[in-house]
Amino acid sequence: MFELGVTTEQIMAFLLVFARVGAWVWLTPPFGGGFLPPLVRIMAGLAFSIPMTPSAIASSGGISLDPVNLLLQFALQVVIGVALGLVCLTLISAVQSAGALIDVASGFSLAAAYDPLQQQQSAVISRVYQLLAGVLLLVSGAYLILFAGFAKTFEVLPIGNGLSLDATASTLTSALSVGFVAILQIAGPIIAVLLLADIGLGLLTRVAPTINIFVLSFPVKIGLTLLLVGVAIPQLTPMIAGLTDSSVDAMRGIVGG
């Protein structure tokens, strides 16, 4: 009779590893966070789980085959994966959030104020920054750093161990603070220049009251925004690298490393 040579313990361990990996991949850019289709994310989670399973078994010292314990462990691994993915998503999505602020300041998102159905089409800079963040993570190899940092979590927090709620809450709070600072660093200079442009246009109306400032401001601010974004794009690479390192540190903080 043909035998695969795979034990029940290995199969159960693979499913538990996939529970953590799948939840993490579902949320973490460039794999998740809406960057890839759902089916691709599931397949990526299955593929990433295969090489992690042997080390996960070795770190845990064995997998209990009790049905109730398996269900509890599966739910726990999902929670751990969500916590790890959420902290990575919070930090790396700072780039996209900065783009959303630029959209508001430049007037790109003004169409959504009149027609909510145009919200996705008007988020120009936000979508560009989201795409750039994903591409830079892939091209620069930063995703390998994220992947290696996540793989270490099975050694620091083996299957069968619980998650510290205090450490998780503290790390998520710190990640929000770091993400907020990153948003200001990315979008702050551009918003400041756009504010100066608004002040200049306001002074222009005092000099020449006949000028229709409402009509003039749109092409001026949009053109200025595109110019500033083109200048700022090269600076996203070191920002992505810093956010990647912060994500790895945050994952280490959650699992108690």
Image: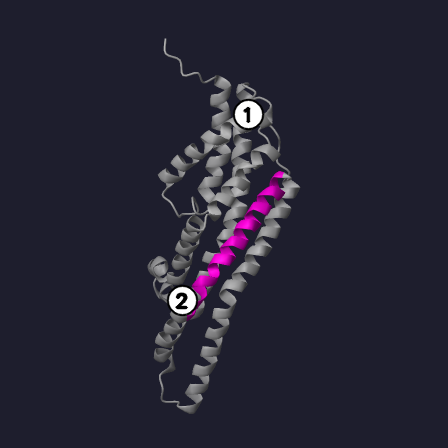
Q: Which residue is rendered at x = 47% and y = 27% of the image?
A: 15
Q: What segment is highlighted magenta in the picture?
A: 228-255
Q: Is residue 169 left or right of residue 232?
A: right
Q: Which three-letter amino acid code belongs to the residue tagged 1?
A: Ile
Q: Is residue 46 above or below residue 38?
A: above
Query: Please, what is the dominant secondary structure of the magenta stretch?
Result: helix
Q: Is residue 111 left or right of residue 82?
A: left
Q: Earlier in the sequence, mark 1 or mark 2?
A: 1
Q: CA distance from mark 1 to mark 2?
A: 48 Å
Q: Which residue is rendered at x = 54% and y = 54% of the image?
A: 242
* Front-lying residue, 106 or 255: 255
Q: According to the image, label 2 marks what residue?
A: 230
| Residue furthest out toward the right | 166
Q: Is residue 187 above or below residue 170?
A: below
The magenta stretch spans residue 231: yes
Element class at badge 2: helix
Q: Position of residue 251 (x, y in %)?
A: 58, 43
Which disc is residue 57 wearing? 1
Q: How many residues crowd mark 2 within 10 Å: few (<14), some (14–19), many (20+)?
A: few
Q: Position of residue 133 (x, y in %)?
A: 44, 54
Q: Quadrant of residue 197?
A: bottom left
